[in-house]
Image (cartoon, rainbow, N blue to C red):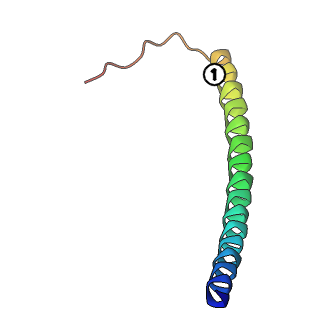
Amino acid sequence: MDERLVELETRVAFQDNTLEELNEVIISQQDQIDLLNREVKLLKEQMLGLHGSRDDYKTEDPPPPHY
């Protein structure tokens, strides 16, 4: 009976450790997701800015033919 109790306590300790490691990975991944979301938002704003400035420089030349 004593051996079984020790085995169960050991398993619980390993599971606690694994859960803590997984939690740290999830926190790290969420930080990366947040950073990527900010970068995508910045890129969208830059693209909208480029789109607006492109309209200011329109020329009367026809576009080149596509082959």
Q: Can you say whether 2 is above or below 48 in the image?
A: below
Q: Position of residue 58 (x, y in %)?
A: 59, 15
Q: Secondary structure at mark 1?
A: helix
Q: Position of residue 18 (x, y in %)?
A: 65, 71
Q: Can you say whether 48 is above or below 59 in the image?
A: below
Q: Quadrant of residue 45?
A: top right
| Residue bearing mark 1 | 54
Quarter of the image where the C terminus is located: top left
Side of 65 relative to 29 (left or right):
left
Please name the residue shown 68% across and 48% down the image: 33
- Residue farthest to the top, as pictured: 60
Quarter of the image where the N terminus is located: bottom right
Q: How many marks?
A: 1
- Residue farthest to the front, as pictured: 1
Q: Nearer the viewer, residue 54 or 37?
A: 37
Q: Amino acid at mark 1?
A: Arg
Q: Quadrant of residue 43?
A: top right
